Image: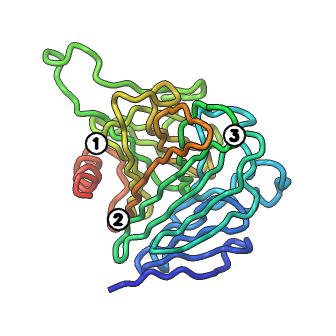
Amino acid sequence: MSSITFEPASYGGWDGCHRLSNGVIDLMISGGFGPRVLFFGFTGGDNELAEIYDGAAKVPADQFRLYGGHRFWHAPEAQPRTYYPDNNPVDITFADGVLTLAAPTESTTGMQKTLHISLDPTGARVLVTHSLTNTGLWPVQVAPWALTCMAPGGTAILPLPPRGSHSENLLPSSHLVLWAYTDFSDPRWTFTPEALLLKADGLSTLPQKIGAPVAQEWLGYARNGHLFVKQFEHRPSAEYPDGGCSGELFVIDYMLEVESLGALVMLQPGETVDHVETWHLLDGVPEPRTAADVAAHITPLVAGL
């Protein structure tokens, strides 16, 4: 039986890092900035997350740095509010199997971000709770937003609602949300009956993004025989940011972001809202390229989680 360990470690040239491991999965977090997860992957294996450390180190400390890894924002996206620099040390505690990363309160927004990370004792499963607290003096309409930057070279999967027939489904059953730069003539997009696929080829510098109300409550990313799945809640009656999105995908040459969003809330002073993701990492899964691949290798695996 595996046991969970938590210990100081060096990673990526950054000081104050720590490793959380159960011998199957490793997570590396930074104490010098964040809250951020810098590494997520099988023990002894490659990082599933994007590493953008060289570029981050060149950005002044008072500006937002895109380190890669997993980060925590609050939606809707706006400049400069969303891009508050998370470059200051975080408070780290590990107790009763829960790793807590608490960032300092943002001076310009009054928001405080905290991650609570629980690693399964024996399996490739992680529970990540994103807690957003309003320490300010007035209510703010906001939604917690969890962004996981995946290493390029794989394919993201956004599940679509079950298909039907024209004769039995006269009204729309779902919708997609597009950004001004979304271009479906880009060859990185593939549409299948069960899912929309977005390839991170590591080459194209043209960004692409899409969002949707993801009633299936999961998003995935397949790369090098591994399948990363994040599960999250979708509440059909709730109001979500970005035209109703609980899930979004974004790609550029150096990363692909798998993003989930909580519902919009009017967060009162002193209140906290939580957004929970469950991460899974599966081995021996081929990267999907066609509808048959999705049906054979992705949908059944996710249904069994």
Q: Residue at x 21, y 13 (%)?
A: 170
Task: From the image, tell me which residue sits under label 2.
Answer: 282
Q: Is residue 95 above or below residue 260?
A: below
Quadrant for the C terminus, please.
Answer: bottom left
Spot occupied by residue 88 in the image (x, y as percentages of width and height):
76, 59
Quadrant of the drawing holding the N terminus: bottom left
State left or right for residue 260 relative to residue 90. Answer: left
Q: Which mark is residue 136?
A: 3
Q: Amino acid at mark 1?
A: Ala
Disc on the earlier residue, 3 or 2: 3
Closer mark to the observer between disc 3 and disc 2: 3
Q: Residues within 10 Å of mark 2 (few under 14, many from 20)?
A: some
Give the mark toward the camera: 1 or 2.
Answer: 2
Location of residue 301 in the rendering, given as x and y in whole percent from the top left corner: 26, 56
Residue at the (53%, 69%) spot, across then down: 99
Amino acid type indicated by mark 3: Gly
In screen coordinates, is 161 left or right of 77? left
Its colouring scheme is rainbow
Mark 1 or 2, nearer chain start: 2
Q: Residue furthest left?
A: 168
Image spot of residue 12 (x, y percent):
69, 71
**Element carrying mark 1:** helix
Task: Quickly name the residue at label 1.
Answer: 291
**Residue 67: image x %, image y %?**
68, 57
Q: Earlier in the sequence, mark 3 or mark 1?
A: 3
